[in-house]
Image: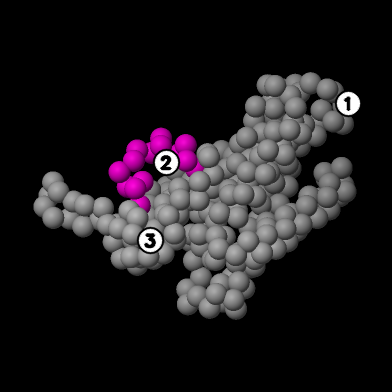
Amino acid sequence: MMNPFFLCIQCGARNEALFRIFTKSALTLQTCDNCSMIIDKYVEYDFTTIFIDILLLKLSAYRHVLYNSNTKSYLSRLVALTLLSFSYVEWVHQKGKKEHRSEPIFYELEWGYYLIIGQELIKAALFSLTFLLFGFISSKLIMHQELFPFKHMIHGMAMSYCWNLVTIPSLVWNHYSTYHVLSQIALLISCNHTFHVCICPSYVLSTVTIICSWGVQWSAEHGLQYTYLFS
Ligand SMILES: [Zn+2]
């Protein structure tokens, strides 16, 4: 189902249409009622350009993907790929740490790998639930939005989670900590963009939401590591 409105990628204002069709071969991009810029220039761009702008963490690209584009079927597959590959990186790193190896080595799949997948699923679920809860509270009590943009928030968090793919090069080049820190910074900025686009442009609210979500995830991670299965 199409959105009842489209977001201006420059200012975030809601608009009714992205373009006006005159004939089958002639259409014109609409300008925003609020800022008078073209509402969404990305409708004329190919996927590669949009993807590069997402990698550059441009807020305008997030607005386009979350509200003005209907092609998000690839997201679920990308999230599954991220979960499997990121869990493998974590598993190799944790196993190497236990065996006091400085260089990562490639292991055959073992039961421990599947446990790490479970651990990562729980962490991601807790992070997402806390993020959604704070987003819901902000949208209803502070922004007084009629409809909570649940679907857009889920898509935004899925995009953010895919930043964990940044850790994969550590399997080849080592320096796991550097890649992990970079991936987490990008993930948190991406979550901040999602909050800005879907709920409100308040840095205070988005920062509180992200810190609380990250704190819940961090607690779960350390709680799980001290249990019998993950120790
Ligand atoms: Zn605008």
Residue 3: in sight, yes or no? Answer: no
Report the coloring of the rendering: one colour
Mark closer to the observer (2, 1): 2
Q: Which mark is residue 50?
A: 2
State which quadrant residue 74 falls in.
top left
Q: Quadrant of ligand 1?
A: bottom left
- Expressed as whole percent of the image width and height from the top left, the position of residue 163 reads 60, 41
Query: What residue is disc 3 on?
Result: 35
Q: Which one is in front, 117 or 170?
A: 170
Q: Looking at numbered disc 3 in the image, what kind of residue is underneath it?
A: Cys
User: Toward the viewer: 176 or 193?
Assistant: 193
Q: Which mark is residue 100?
A: 1
Q: Nearer the viewer, residue 144 or 220?
A: 144
Image: 225 above or below 142: above
* Residue situated in front as seen by the camera: 57 or 87: 57
The furthest residue to the left: 23
In the image, residue 41 lies in the stretch drawn in magenta = yes
Residue 204 located left or right of residue 73: right
- Of the image marks 3 and 1, the number of the one nearer the N terminus: 3
- Real-space Cα distance between discs 2 and 3? 22 Å
Q: Which residues are magenta?
A: 40-54
Which percent across, then down, holds residue 133?
Answer: 64, 68
Mark 3: C-beta under 8 Å from nearest atom of ligand 1: yes
Instruction: Name the amino acid, label 1.
Output: His
